[in-house]
Amino acid sequence: MQYVSTRAAASAASSSSQQFSDILLGGLAPDGGLYLPTEYPQVTGAELDKWRQLSYADLAYEILRKFATDIPEADLRALTAKTYTKEVYCNARKGEKASQITPLRVLEEREDGSRLVLQALSNGPTLAFKDMAMQLLGNLFEYTLAKHDAQLNIFGATSGDTGSAAEYAMRGKKGIRVFMLSPHKKMSAFQTAQMFSLQDPNIFNIAVEGVFDDCQDMVKAVSNDLPFKAKQKIGTVNSINWARVVAQVVYYFRGYLSATTSNDQKVSFTVPSGNFGNICAGHIARMMGLPIDKLVAATNENDVLDEFFRTGVYRVRKSAETYHTSSPSMDISKASNFERFVYDLVGRDGDRTRALFQKVETHGGFDLSGKPGSDGDEFKLVAKYGFKSGKSTHADRVNTIRDVADDYDITIDTHTADGIKVARENMEAGVTMIVLETALAAKFNETILEALGVDAERPAGFENIEALPQKFVVMPADVEKMKAYIAANTGL
Ligand SMILES: *Cc1c(COP(=O)(O)O)cnc(C)c1O
């Protein structure tokens, strides 16, 4: 399986292609594009039938081997078996079909044959779906680095979810250190405790005296210092990482296969979306031949994606137009994985994709509505790819959390609430709608308290995490001091 950049000129595409392991540790392609396979591997009905019986780990192996063709099969099987275990993914919810890794829960069965179903993806160590991919990434990184006797120092900034998922995936891994910046005293006590309570010697929590943007600016400044970056073997694990996207493809298959008994039954997915990483994996599953009917992107007030799927206009937001909401992991100004879908939408034309995303840089967006003066008319093809969308506000979240608690006696988190709200607007007769649960309620307790008047239940093991000893350093927003700190701790 070969990979190309979404911005590769047609003439260069074959000469610049790469294997899975080549792009595993990297982010963007050198031309600024994102990597995709030259073609999507196809899944047959017979394979789907066989896969119905598989464990999550075995299913992950079957799907990954189609993409990671340069990793020996026995190694890949060992990596997926080590990653997708009860011990890693079932701490949070005891009992309840735990060994299934991503169990389904039917919320509602309607007379028209439709069903509303929740797929649990948030029972990993940080109680959010990012663990589904990040834990595999930790094992893949360790495996690949050991093969080349190499090291990697992950350097990133976080305001919550991504940073803790990365730390929990990389803790104790040989050859890897994590330097994670966060704004000092700006994260919730729960999130701070989750990250700072890690005592592993390869995890470095750096609380920066400033806001999240200061942290991000420091990451940029360090990344732009190419000699420093090379000497210190600096890398990132952001949501554009291809292996993360592929790992997420697996739970769409699991969800479909668990919700159906035969391959002619229809299933749609609603996905609480921010950077388009999660739903991009759904698009890939569909392109591989998984019988997904609709893929519904649910956004919060930061509705960049909803606007595109309603109008064909992609317009990134300025910071002043980017809202801090009660579903904060979806607070984005642009969707960093969206380019992968646009590449498919414009017929896998790298020259077009490059021009469109250069226009994002110069003009803040592009327009594929087909109206006079627009940049193309491919919006008309969106339905063919199954995409739909909807938007949810703070008031919707509060109401949805309350409804779901009243009707089904479960407490959902704010991001999942955005998903349920939009899913309900997109139910169709005879079709099962699976909503992906992207976090547990305990992580966003403030809004739960507002909606229900009681605290969200803390899963076992998290009851007292704020009281655990914390390991972190406080630093000013000073790039030179940061570089000195990194160099002193890597010894490189
Ligand atoms: C990251 C995240 C999202 C958004 O996922 P994308 O892949 O960025 O679209 C939604 N909900 C939660 C809880 C998250 O952590």
Image (tube, grey):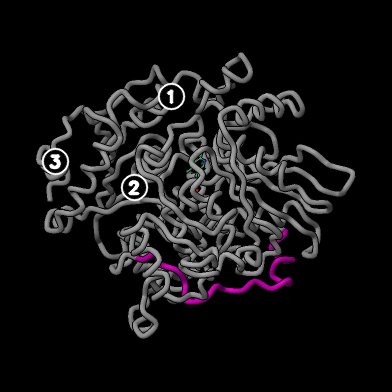
Badge 3 density bin: few <14, some 14–19, many ≥20, Cα 10 Å:
some
| Residue type of the residue flagged with mark 3 | Val
Specify the farthest residue to the front.
Answer: 372
**Residue visible at 44% across and 52% down?**
315
**Residue visible at 34% across and 47% down?**
173
Image x and y of residue 141, in percent = 36, 56
| Mark 2 → mark 3, Cα distance in angstroms | 27 Å
Specify the farthest residue to the right.
Answer: 111
Q: Earlier in the sequence, mark 1 or mark 3?
A: 1
Residue assigned mark 1? 190
Q: Which residues are magenta?
A: 33-52
Image x and y of residue 407, in percent = 77, 27
Determine the secondary structure under disc 3.
helix
| Residue type of the residue flagged with mark 1 | Phe
Question: Can residue 3 be found in the magenta stretch?
Answer: no
Determine the secondary structure under disc 2.
loop
> What mark, if any, has residue 158 been given in the picture?
none
**Residue visible at 61% across and 25% down?**
398
> What mark, if any, has residue 479 been given in the picture?
3
- In the visual, does 320 lie left or right of 253? left
| Vertical arrangement, residue 445 with respect to residue 226, above or below | above
| Vertical arrangement, residue 298 with respect to residue 354, above or below | above
**Residue visible at 57% across and 33% down?**
393
Q: Earlier in the sequence, mark 2 or mark 3?
A: 2
Quarter assignment of residue 16: bottom left
Residue assigned mark 2? 173
> Contact (CB < 8 A) between labels 2 and 3?
no
Question: Can residue 42 be found in the magenta stretch?
Answer: yes
Determine the secondary structure under disc 1.
helix
Quarter assignment of residue 365: bottom left
Specify the farthest residue to the bottom.
Answer: 11
Q: Is residue 123 visible?
A: no
